[in-house]
Amino acid sequence: MATFRHICDSVAVITLSNPPVNALSSALIQALQKALGEAIRDSAVEAIVICGDKGKFCAGADIREFNKPSQKRGPHLLLLTDLIESNKKPVVAAIEGVALGGGLELALGCHYRVAHVQARVGLPEVLLGILPAASGTQRLPRLIGIAAALTLITTGKYVPAREALKLGIVDKVVGENTVDEAIRLAKKVIGQPLGSRQLSTLPVQCPPNVEALLAEAMVKVKKQFRGAQSPQACIEAVRAAVHLPYTEGIKKEQELYQFLNATHEPRAQQYAFFAEREVAKWTLPSGASWKTVSPQPIHTAAVIGLGTMGRGIVTSLAKAKIPVVALEQDKRQLDIGSKAVMSLLDREILKMEQLGHTEATNSLGPVRFTLDYDELKDVDIVIEAVFENMALKKDIFRRLSVVCKPEAFLCTNTSGLNIDEIASVTNRPQMVIGTHFFSPAHIMKLLEVVRGCYTSSTTISTAMRLAKMLGKIGVLVGNCPSFVGNRLMRLYVEQAVFLVEEGSKPEEIDLALEDFGLAMGPFRMMDLAGLDIGWKARTEIGLTGPKLPIGTPARQRGSKRYSPLPDILCEQGRFGQKSGQGWYKYEKSGGRNAMPDPWLYNFLSEYRCIHNLKTRNITQEEVIERCLYILINQGFKVLEEGIASDPKDIDVIYNNGYGWPKHTGGPMYYASLVGLPVVLTKLEKYYEDNPDILDLKPSNFLKKLVASGTPPLKEWRSHLGSQSSKL
Ligand SMILES: C/C=C(\C)C(=O)SCCNC(=O)CCNC(=O)[C@H](O)C(C)(C)COP(=O)(O)OP(=O)(O)OC[C@H]1O[C@@H](n2cnc3c(N)ncnc32)[C@H](O)[C@@H]1OP(=O)(O)O
């Protein structure tokens, strides 16, 4: 686990070994304590180097042990950092790969830190619902100052070695032989005084405006991580470093850690962490799985369509160093699209340069722009990203069938159209798959991978591998209108509009849901995305516009409630941010500052009059429950239908594609937190009050789970029975 050997007589090298990431399990901490004790006691040892096995220093505490009772977790890392720091023999950390969380705290206990140029360091505890509780909140501010420490601790950001050097976190960055360099440094400093290297003894350098800095950080995290407690606790811990001596600061750090641990946040965040990794381990009902089916290599790719999505997808491929051919339909579109792509790529280069990459330009894959389909003949994979029109997509896929080599995979970036219908026009339906990117596609982590009924397991394996190559989280889902993410989202948004009809203001609904923690409320989101997009789609399928049968009641489609409000806004030219008006008004077309619009209030009063709707006071509680529970209810339906195979798939989709607050774990995890009987009872009540909102009717699966005694979330899947999976 932690082995110790002599090098050149005087330097002991202790190697942390706990594959795959050398996480600090209780066993590893114990072994490290033992190895350190031996090295300290051995009079032949004059200095110590701590490094990690297989090119990784340490990814921090072993998260899998977090649910163990603390007394069973063995010696505390905090004591170990004190033991290292107070040792008279210099200790040097040789950081390769990562030094994260407890891994960085261990390194901060050391007197010197040498890092490999590709190493990354950080304190990501906040992303796990906790705070750095092995002195990180006390030692880091003493090393790099309050402002930089606050940023690192409250964002959990990983910092590349060169930036860490600039910040003063590491003392030296090397291109190779990190451990040898650490040994050299250790030998050099033998016998030198260590006082200035013992971070716990240093004063915190406080700028005069330190309180303003802390207050500013508090405002920022309250806005950025609405409803989450760990970022605020992180700031309180840093505040303690400012005002208290080290040992008192440590006491405060421990107190805040215990407080956070008693909340639901750590469990929710840790569930989300592992869920993101588990979704990569897909299995089909046939037994084929990520373990048994090899992906085909992807050396080259093509993207069709250089609209917003296409541009992001090209950039994402280039960032993954995959050469791309980018195709548009005419010269004008190609010129506009290529300029936009080049500007995105320039921004990526700039970002890399700011992080210290010296050869940023060479770290992007080449992009070739073309109008000629023949240039696609040799690519390994094509991603179609034209607008949502089935006839157009079918035309393109017919053409791709002819042009592309037989081994090429054909993907569509549709956000909800039928994959099987698209596949059916090709000469290789088994090689057609949905790859639903999220905007901006070069930034958002989520990729919904949509399996059609013809899609082969090799195609799935290759698309999931592509997600990994792009640094994204691929989630495999089945084919149904709007797939998983948008299918649930549509009901959530529709519910919000119904609530406006009943008396809420858009800004009240947005505020309630943003206070809950969603990155953006539904009305601000609609305005940002453009109201015209949904309007076009509804017009195409005859929910509104000329195809709507004459005599259809304005607020009813079939037996379901329908709100024509968004259609009417579009008829008035209110498309959202792009037109300067939507649910809100903006300072100008394209403006981003949403302001409540008195025009809308008058319009809504008239609308309610026309439709004989009585305005009532709607509580925040009702807003949250109706919007979120209808989404969750649909999540249960998606599971029941086999469109998603596990609740964690839905949670990963929502956490990473829809701005759901991770500190609640995701919608399905949140349902388990609230309690399924509560969710069921509320849905029954709201359905009784609104019998024309059919999607409020509780799903059979939810009812089944409650009837089975509300099993824990990880057991839900086993209650699904043997219905046919769509995966
Ligand atoms: C108090 C709290 C203290 C002192 C802490 O230290 S809290 C822990 C802080 N550390 C982290 O949050 C690090 C989390 N890990 C990562 O960011 C990444 O995993 C990585 C950068 C270390 C590696 O990324 P990558 O190469 O993409 O690989 P994966 O993310 O897929 O991880 C590989 C497997 O390792 C498991 N893992 C990663 N970190 C930990 C950990 N700290 N404890 C336990 N297990 C960890 C991860 O789940 C993967 O497992 P498998 O899916 O392969 O089974």
Image (cartoon, rainbow, N blue to C red):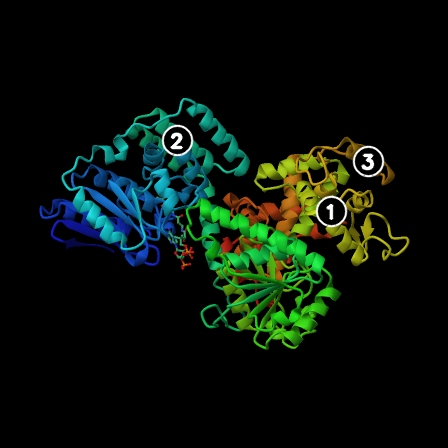
Q: Is residue 12 left or right of residue 242?
A: left
Above-or-below relation of 303 to 198: below
Camera-nearest label, 1 or 3:
1
Sort mark 3 into few (<14), some (14-19) or many (20+) by Cα contacts within 10 Å.
few
Report x, y in % for residue 528. Answer: 67, 44
Sort mark 2 into few (<14), some (14-19) or many (20+) by Cα contacts within 10 Å.
many
Say which residue appears at 54% left-offset and 44% top-offset. Answer: 661
> Label 2 near label 3: C-beta < 8 Å?
no
Above-or-below relation of 511 to 411: above
Sort mark 1 into few (<14), some (14-19) or many (20+) by Cα contacts within 10 Å.
many
Camera-nearest label, 3 or 2:
2
Name the kind of residue labelled 3 in the image: Phe
- The residue sitting at the top extreme is 208
Say which residue appears at 70% left-offset and 57% top-offset. Answer: 333
Looking at the image, can residue 487 be seen?
no
Quarter of the figure that contains the C terminus: bottom right
- Of the numbered discs 1 and 3, the one sitting upstream in the chain is 1
Q: Which residue is mark 2?
A: 146
